[in-house]
Image: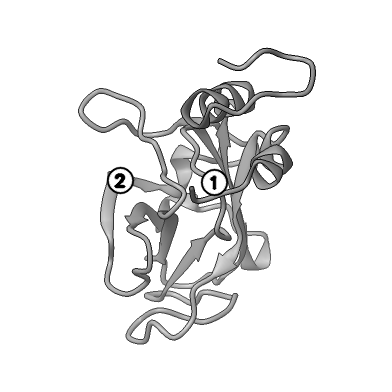
Amino acid sequence: MNYSQRTLDEYSDDSQVNLEDIVTGLGGDFVNAFPVPPTKLIRLTHKSRPGYTPTKIAIDLNLAGGASNYLDFTLQFYLFPGGVSTGLGLEVGSQMRGNQFLNKDGTQIHVPFPQYRNESIDIGSLETLALVIKNNGAANNLDSAFVTVYYNNKEFYALCKKRCGCVTPGSAPM
């Protein structure tokens, strides 16, 4: 059993996973903190947590000097098996551009989470989802980014109960 009922209960009312932890020490063109200058990359990930099935993605990019050329940024999701944090991991979906998530006026566009073999992708409790953002522009730094991956919390909790045989107070076992 990877997580206790107490841990699962703690996540049962959440509906999003924020990729806000910067992976440091990768070397090469990866930076260890914001800002991300032209030609450099940053990897964002989340803290260890129970598994989930992403449904959609929302991303905010804050560019230096009030710039709005989100086309200059490529974004690629990766999945890392338990205990692995080096290398690129397994690609999830196609490489995307910042303008697929943000209009020129900065308003967000929610994008469906990629599928695998025409099915939803489950992110296991021993796996980590990461996003690599590359600045392909010539002039503007990426000052910050906020990445939210949404999931259906009611479905998450129902699946957890079903898979572990857990019950909530006042209900019969499944």
In terms of depth relative to the viewer, which is nearer, 149 or 158? Answer: 158
Q: Which residue is mark 1?
A: 50
Q: Nearer the viewer, residue 113 or 41?
A: 113
Q: Quadrant of residue 161?
A: top right
Judge whether 86 appears above or below 131 on screen: below
Residue 79 relative to residue 109: left or right = left
Inspect the image, locate mark 1, and give the three-letter code of the amino acid beneath it: Pro
Q: Residues within 10 Å of mark 1 (few under 14, many from 20)?
A: some
> Badge 2, how many Cα within 10 Å: few under 14, some, many 20+?
some
Looking at the image, residue 82 lies above or below residue 69: below
Q: Relative to 40, is 145 above or below?
A: above
Provide residue 119's location: percent of width, then percent of height.
Answer: 29, 24
Which amino acid type is shown beneath numbered disc 2? Val
Residue at position x 61%, y 17% in the image: 173
Residue at the (37%, 75%) spot, across then down: 39
Give the camera-side residue of 14 and 174.
Answer: 174
SS type, badge 2: strand
Q: In the image, what residue occupies the spot 39% across and 36% down?
A: 122
Whether residue 79 is visible here, answered yes or no, is: yes
Is residue 152 left or right of 31 when viewed as pictured?
A: right
Residue beneath disc 2: 92
